[in-house]
Amino acid sequence: MTTERLYYTDCYLRDFEARVLQAEPGPQGLRVYLDHSAFYPESGGQPSDRGTLAGIPVLDVIDEGDQVAHVLASKPEGETVRGEIDWSRRFDHMQQHTGQHLLSAAFDKIGGFKTVSFHLGVEASTIDLDSDRLGRRQIEEAEGLANSVVFENREVRILFQPASEASRMDLRKPTAREGDVRLIEVAGFDLSACGGTHVGRTGAVGSIAVRRIEPAKGNMRVEFVCGSRALRAARRDFLALSEAGRLLSGGLEQVPALVAKQSEELRSAIRAREKLMGRLAAYRAAELVSMVEARDGGRIVRLIFPAEELVEAKMIAHAIAKQPSAVAFLGVRSAAGAKGDSATLVFAQSADGGADMSGILRQVLGNVGGKGGGTRYFAQGAVAGEKLEEALVLAETLLGR
C-alpha cells in the first residue's frame, strides 16, 4: 500500500478527492490511509499540513515511508473522501521553506557556509551553519543576496532525476537518496534535493529577514522570517520602537542613542546609590556594634532584617566586620509568598576574629537544615523561614562567647 503524494508535483493543490484504503486506531487518534494525498507530512524540518478530510479536522500527518497517515478524531464515512488543505498554513510554510533554500544558498555563495540543519517553527525558522563565527557583514551580505533573488521573481521548478544522474548535478548538498530524487531548482541560483513544499516563483517569498544569530553546538544558528511573518515582525518592531521613542521623547532613529544615554545615567545613579548605601551601612554597623555589650573582648550583633533589606543586610554584615573584634549573625526573612519560604543567614567577623564563620554555618545547617557556604570571615546560607531565629541563636551559642 503506497500513498501517491500529490504535493510532490503540485504544491498549490488545495483540495482533492481520494479513496480510503485503510483506517486503524493509533496513539493519537484514528490513522487514515488514502490512495493519494495532497497533505504534507512532517519531514525535513517542515511541519505537517492541517485541514480536513470529509469535513473532519486533520490533527496530524505522519510520514511512514511509502505511506502517509492522516490522524483524525473519527472515521470518515464512505470509500471516497474530499480533502481540503489549510491554505494559510500551507502557503506560510511554502514561503518559509523556499526562503530557507535562498538564504542557505546565499550563505554558501558568500562564504562557503554550509547549512547542516533546518527547522521551521511557529513564529520563526532557523538554519544551523557549519561555522563558529559569523559577522554582521556576512549576515547582511547573505540576506541581501537572498532578497535580490526574491525581487527578481525567478522561477522555482520541481524536477525528478534518477539518483545516479542527480549525483552528477551541481547540488548544493549531496544526497544519499536512492531511486528517483526530487529536486528544487531556483533558476540560476540553487539546486537542492528536497521533499518539501515551495512557491512557484521567488517573488512569492515576499522578503527574507534575519532576526537573530547565536552559537549552537559548535555551529551558528541563524533565525529568520519570510513573507507574511517578515511583515508582522517589521510591524512589531515599528510599534515597539515608536513606543520607545514616545517614552524617551524622541524619534525612532534616536532610540538607540537615547537608550544608551539613559543606560549610562542609570549606571551612574546605581553607583551613587551604592556609595550612599555603603556609607549608611557603615553608620548603622557602628551604631549596632556600640549598642551591644562587649563579651570576652568582642561584640556580637544578632539581628533579623525584613525581606526587602537583603542587600542592606549583606552590606551591614561587611561593615560590622570592619569594626574591631566584631561578629555579625544576621538573618533576612523570606519574601511574602516566596517559593519554599526560604530565609537568609549572613555571618561575618572582623579580620582579627578567631572563629570560623563557614564552620559555624555548617554546624548550624547541620542542626536546622538548609544549605550554604563561605570562608573563615564571611559565610551565607539559607534555612526555612520558621528556623531563622533558632539558627541565629545557635550560631551565637556555637561562637562560645
Image (spheres, grey):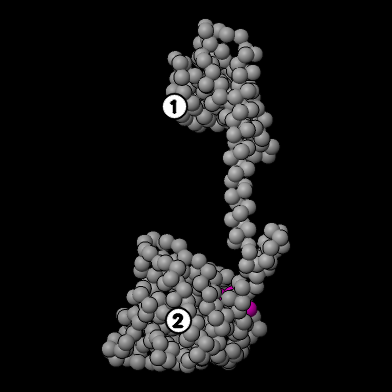
Image coordinates of residue 302 in percent, x first then y, are 60, 19
Disc number for residue 283: none
| Residue at the spot 63% in from the left edge and 43% down from the top edge | 269
Mark closer to the chain start, 1 or 2: 2
Image coordinates of residue 254 in percent, x first then y, are 63, 64
Image coordinates of residue 276 in percent, x first then y, are 63, 33
> Which residue is at the front of the view, 33 or 391?
391
> Which residue is at the front of the view, 323 or 210?
323
Q: Which image quarter: residue 247? A: bottom right
Give the amino acid at mark 2.
Answer: Leu
Mark 2: secondary structure: helix
Residue 273 position (above or below residue 16) = above
| Residue at the spot 63% in from the left edge and 28% down from the top edge | 280
Residue 7 appears in the figure:
no
- Residues in magenta, as a range: 57-61
**Chief secondary structure of the magenta portion:** strand
Give the amino acid at mark 1.
Answer: Thr
Q: Give the residue pinned by disc 1.
A: 375
38 in the magenta segment: no
Mark 1: secondary structure: loop
Q: Which image quarter: residue 135? A: bottom left
Residue 243 appears in the figure:
yes
Q: Give the residue pinned by disc 2.
A: 145
State the count of labels.
2
